[in-house]
Image (cartoon, helix red, strand yellow):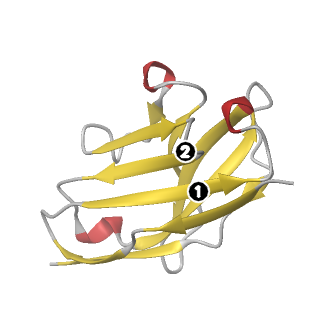
Amino acid sequence: QVHLVESGGGLVQAGGSLRLSCAASGGTFSDLDMAWFRQAPGKEREFVARIPWSAAAATYANSVKGRYTISRNNLENTVYLQMASLKPEDTAVYYCAAGLIGALTYDYWGQGTQVTVSS
């Protein structure tokens, strides 16, 4: 069983930056495909970014490409989401997710962290 805990959310002005962290425990971190999703009020949860093993393999939603960077530290069992040039439409609860590399499913989820971008 993998346990995920997000941190780093908050309130930021448009154009600002935030870095989210997700600490994983209970599994072999290097075997995990790590991802970030988000859910805005009244909308469905949507994919943001994933990093299966290294930054070279990372993929992003078109809406965040060029502004967000996902990274991981396998020694610290942590995945990060660096967010820059934030927009009000980035406001959402951000969730960290994990699944086995190659499975293409995310079986483990964190509790979420709120990101609010003011205009």
Q: Nearer the viewer, residue 43 or 54?
A: 54
For badge 1, the amino acid type reads Ala
Residue name at image x 53 percent, y 51 percent: 36
| Whole-percent x, y for residue 18 in the image | 28, 62
Earlier residue among tags 1 and 2: 1
Measured as percent of width and height from the top left, residue 28 is found at 76, 37
Is label 2 in a helix, a strand or a loop? loop
Q: Nearer the viewer, residue 103 or 23?
A: 23
Residue under pointer 2: 76
Q: Which residue is mark 1?
A: 23
Depth check: 3 or 50 in front? 3
Residue 64 locus on image (x, y percent): 33, 46
| Image spot of residue 46 (x, y percent) | 55, 56
Q: Residue at x 58, y 25 (%)?
A: 53
**Kind of residue at disc 2:** Glu
Image marks 1 and 2: residues in contact by CB distance under 8 Å: yes
Residue at 21% in and 75% down: 12
